[in-house]
Image: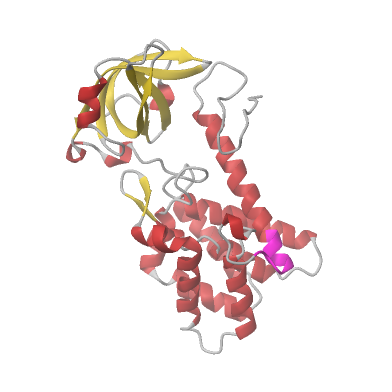
Amino acid sequence: MKKQYIESLNAGDYVDDIFVLSESFIAQKKDGSNYLNITVSDKTGKIKGVMWDNIEQITDKSSSSDFVHLQGTVSEYKGTCQLIIKKMDPYLADLVDLSDFLPQTSRNIDNMLERLKEITSSMEKNCYKKLFDEFWNDKNFVQKFKTAPAAKTLHHAYIGGLIEHSLSIAILSDKIAGHYGGIDRDLLLAGGILHDVGKIKEFEYIWKIEYSDEGRLLNHIVIGLQMVEDKIRKIKDFPEKQAMLLKHMIISHHGHREFGSPEPPKIVEAVLLNYIDEIDSKINGIRDFIASENTNSNWTSYHRAFGRYFYIS
């Protein structure tokens, strides 16, 4: 049974427990000999570590994505905790409780689903109400929508992350639609709730979040578009124009072709969705990064994706 979690580790602690080996690579000391850099994780976060000696026998036994039994100590390096590994051995997945390793949303998933249903029932256009009835009455979809992560690493990367992100987008969309005149609230809400819906198939998440074969080959935009088209076909006389605009919201929500969108946003609602999605994903990612930092400094470690340090006020 796992007893030590990353969020509670402090400099000086002795570590003797099971973790997921998220990353490992060999580097060179100043004298030219090798040492091992690793990152391990559990449901509470990630921590980097180093192993200075006897690494050949370790690299032959363990690879990224394995469970490992670590023994070592926690030290402080540049204001951040890191592990000094003395011993690392593979550990059988059959012997672990998978819930110890996959993070989950802190929010109530069923309550979030009910809030989304309230929002979709408030829509004025009947076609969108019928579309969401098709989704909410699909038990298989609902189960996956409630559990899927919204990303592998950068934002909402945990069980329930997708529904949390979708609800946040819907709430922000509702507020912004009321601020600007002439906005199609129903379209913005529908696009916001469904923009990442393909992620229920893009990821696999038993004990770690990884891309599925379908996710790697198609990506969530294509998968989501197919899912929406499948539901629309079940609705008699769904307006062709509304279907086209909704599909444009999905394919353009990344904002630029170089960021993965087949087309950039070409209606005001799609422009808004792109920026709302950016706001929610970035704020969540930054907050999670700050929360995961085990440091006594007022500054985080360097965040590669954002290209900066963050001040902890």
- Image coords of residue 83 (percent x, y): 37, 19
Judged from this view, the residue extending furthest toward the right is 181
Q: Is residue 201 magenta?
A: no
Q: Is residue 142 visible?
A: yes
Horizontal relation, residue 29 to residue 285: left or right: left
Horizontal relation, residue 50 to residue 94: left or right: right
- Image coords of residue 46 (percent x, y): 42, 31
Q: Residue at x 59, y 52 (%)?
A: 168
Q: Nearer the viewer, residue 29 or 141?
A: 29
Image quadrant holding the C terminus, namely top right
Q: Residue at x 60, y 56 (%)?
A: 258
Which of the 4 image quarters holds residue 25?
Answer: top left
Judged from this view, the residue extending furthest toward the bottom is 237
Judged from this view, the residue extending furthest toward the front is 32
Which of the 4 image quarters holds residue 208?
Answer: top left
Q: Which residues are magenta?
A: 264-272
Q: Residue at x 36, y 66 (%)?
A: 140
Horizontal relation, residue 91 to residue 26: left or right: left
The image shows residue 264, relative to residue 290, as above or below, that is below
Colour scheme in use: secondary structure
- Image coords of residue 57 (percent x, y): 20, 24
- Image coords of residue 65 (percent x, y): 30, 39
Q: Is residue 269 magenta?
A: yes
Image quadrant holding the N terminus, namely top left
Q: Is residue 1 visible?
A: no
